[in-house]
Image (tube, rainbow, N blue to C red):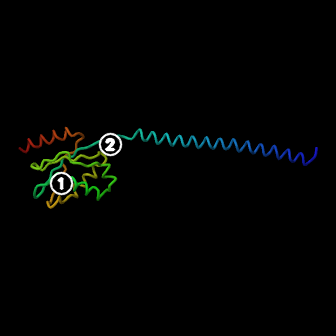
């Protein structure tokens, strides 16, 4: 046997062995990436499933003012103050509204998302004017349902009256 034949046979076997090794390595790496991607995908799916529903809270507040305050103007002023402090994204997530307001008793109910309770409290302290009327908002109580809130309001009015 010739030396050149032996060297070419050796190089052929070596190149085939390297090709097989690289193929096996490629398969293992691709499987590893599939596992990593599926694990991360599973983590994302699990996190989305475990995300809890945003619960609503209702806060009873009292308005101390010089004159009459309009419900819509008051709601807009609270929303503008919240937007100024925390931004539009948090304002949208907080979903602030006033479902009930009694202008005679100057008592209202503020509806918001449970995660923003302390931010809403901070915002109430910042509201000083509604239109041309100077106001001071005093939070009284926070409840989980509108029914409980209205029941508490009813008992408040009976105590006052």
Q: For this rendering, which residue is in front, 54 or 125?
A: 54
Label number found at residue 54: 2
Q: Decide: few, some or many residues near mark 2? Use Cα within 10 Å; few <14, some 14-19, many ≥20.
A: few
Q: Which residue is mark 1?
A: 137
Above or below: residue 59 compared with residue 64: above
Say which residue appears at 13% left-offset and 54% top-offset.
69
Say which residue appears at 57% left-offset and 40% top-offset.
35
Q: For this rendering, which residue is in front, 88 or 150?
A: 88
Which corner quadrant holds the C terminus?
Answer: top left
Judged from this view, the residue extending furthest toward the bottom is 132
SS class, disc 1: strand
> How far across and down, in percent of the image, does residue 49 sit?
41, 38
Circles 2 and 1: CB distance less than 8 Å?
Answer: no
**Of the two numbered discs 2 and 1 in the rendering, the one whose residue sits closer to the viewer:** 2
Say which residue appears at 51% left-offset and 43% top-offset.
40
> How far across and down, in percent of the image, does residue 132 sit?
15, 61
Q: Decide: few, some or many residues near mark 1? Use Cα within 10 Å; few <14, some 14-19, many ≥20.
A: many
Q: Determine which quarter of the picture holds residue 77.
A: bottom left
> How far across and down, in percent of the image, does residue 142 sit?
22, 45
Judged from this view, the residue extending furthest toward the left is 161
Q: Determine which quarter of the picture holds residue 146.
A: top left
Which corner quadrant holds the N terminus?
Answer: top right
Q: Earlier in the sequence, mark 2 or mark 1?
A: 2
């Amino acid at each position: 046997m010739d030396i050149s034949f032996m060297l070419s046979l050796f190089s052929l076997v070596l190149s085939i062995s390297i090709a097989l090794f690289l193929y096996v390595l490629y398969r293992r790496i691709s499987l590893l990436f599939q596992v990593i991607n599926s694990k991360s995908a599973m983590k994302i799916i699990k996190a989305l499933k475990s995300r809890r529903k945003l619960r609503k809270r209702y806060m009873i507040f009292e308005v101390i003012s010089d004159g009459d305050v309009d419900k819509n103007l008051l709601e807009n002023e609270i929303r503008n103050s919240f937007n100024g402090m925390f931004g539009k994204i948090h304002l949208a997530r907080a979903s602030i509204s006033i479902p009930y307001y009694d202008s005679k008793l100057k008592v209202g109910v503020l509806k918001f998302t449970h995660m923003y309770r302390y931010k809403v409290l901070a915002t109430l302290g910042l509201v000083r004017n509604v239109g041309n009327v100077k106001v001071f908002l005093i939070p009284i109580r926070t409840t989980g349902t509108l029914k409980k809130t209205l029941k508490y309001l009813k008992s408040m009015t009976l105590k006052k009256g």
